[in-house]
Image (cartoon, grey):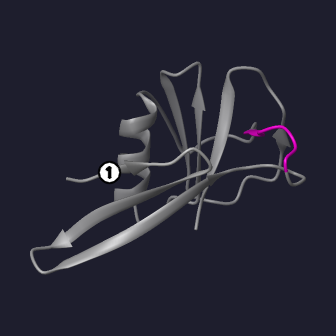
Amino acid sequence: MLMLLLLLGVVFPVTSSMDSVQLVSFSKSRKIKNGPVMCAVDAANETKTSSLQYCLRDCARDGTCTNFNIKNSDTCDIYNYEPRMLLAMPGCENYKVH
């Protein structure tokens, strides 16, 4: 599986069959352009110990994932709905699926 991690956003190719590739892109959630990166504080559908790389992969493979948090580089919160409450929190970044 291939993965390309960019500084401003993430493009993640997910192979869905032998002859097709689906691209999923992610960006950090911000309330205002160039503002602080936000963290979703609503209840996650799933929380697990995972790095950013594996959280990206799991969210990309989940057809209902809309957002995910990565906390302290080792905790992944996956959301299958659009979180309503976003706050700036040290050590936590929320990524939105596009």
Q: Main secondary structure of the magenta part?
A: loop
Q: Quadrant of residue 77?
A: top right
Residue at image position (55%, 57%) is 26
Residue 20 located left or right of residue 65: left
The magenta region covers: 34-39
Mark 1 is surrounded, within 10 Å at the Cα level, by few (under 14), some (14 to 19) or many (20 or more) other residues, namely few
Q: How many marks?
A: 1
Residue at image position (39%, 37%) is 53
SS for dot 1: loop
Residue 58 located left or right of residue 36: left
Residue 64 is at least partly visible in this image: no
Residue 17 is at least partly visible in this image: yes
Instruction: Name the residue type under label 1.
Output: Met
Residue at image position (59%, 18%) is 72
In the rendered image of this protein, does residue 41 appear above or below residue 51?
Answer: below
Residue 11 located left or right of residue 16: right
Q: Which residue position is annotated with label 1?
A: 3
In this view, the residue in front, 43 or 76, is: 76
Looking at the rendered image, the quarter that the C terminus falls into is bottom right
